[in-house]
Amino acid sequence: MKRRPTEESTGNLGFALLGLLARRRSTGYELARRMERPVGYFWSAHHGQIYPELARLEARGFVRHTVVEGAGPRPTKRYAVTAAGRKALREWVVGELEPQPVRDLETLRLWNIWLVEPGAALELVQKLRQDHAARLAAYESELAEVRDSPEAHDPRNPMFASRLTLEGGVRSRRAALEWCDWMREQLESAMHDQTSAH
């Protein structure tokens, strides 16, 4: 199926930026910070990618900027999404899903875990568990801030989408912790069996 023109001309980073600007006007610097958190939980971009993408979005008429007072020697641009940008974003949200390239470094390492000593494998699993636990705590903290807000239960409000995605993060990290605990049990059991055999 042929993709829509907006999907051909605007990359996924562009739609991530449009999603941020649909929530509130921002400078490029503010967008970079907001890309770290909360968007960084599920989509990443380098700081240097943001400004060229903003220029492309502006050339397409999806965003516009106003010049505001800034701390630096150059003028600071504050960007806002246009009606055309909102329309493109809405079409993209419900458009055909593209196959996503899978790059899961954690699983790739675990897939090769048989090459290392069980003790080193156990340390890796413990480290992964700590990382998942830290991310779970961050998700739960942010979810607690929005969960009871009336806006977070209104499907037309950005906070509703934030609540949905944070809940997804909480659930996936809990599953990851359960997996880590299971792997630890498997490794400890195997280590015990090897010790008993000697």
Image (cartoon, grey):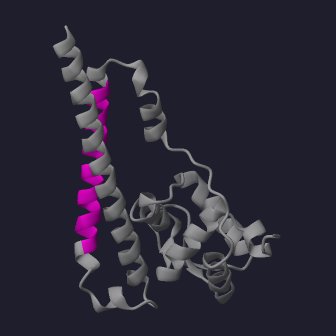
Q: Residue at x 33, y 50 (%)?
A: 176
- Occupied quadrant, residue 97: bottom right
Of residues 31 and 121, the one nearer the viewer is 121
Q: Position of residue 81 (x, y in %)?
A: 59, 81
In this rendering, position of residue 98 left or right of residue 34: right
In this rendering, position of residue 135 left or right of residue 68: left
Q: Position of residue 124 (x, y in %)?
A: 31, 31
Q: Residue at x 62, y 83 (%)?
A: 90
> What range of the chain is rendered magenta?
121-143
Q: Residue at x 49, y 74 (%)?
A: 26
Q: Position of residue 84 (x, y in %)?
A: 69, 85
Of residues 94 and 175, the one nearer the viewer is 175
Q: Residue at x 44, y 89 (%)?
A: 155
Above or below, comparing residue 74 to residue 4 in the picture: above
User: Does residue 108 show up magenta in the picture?
Assistant: no
Q: How many marks?
A: 0
- Occupied quadrant, residue 195: top left
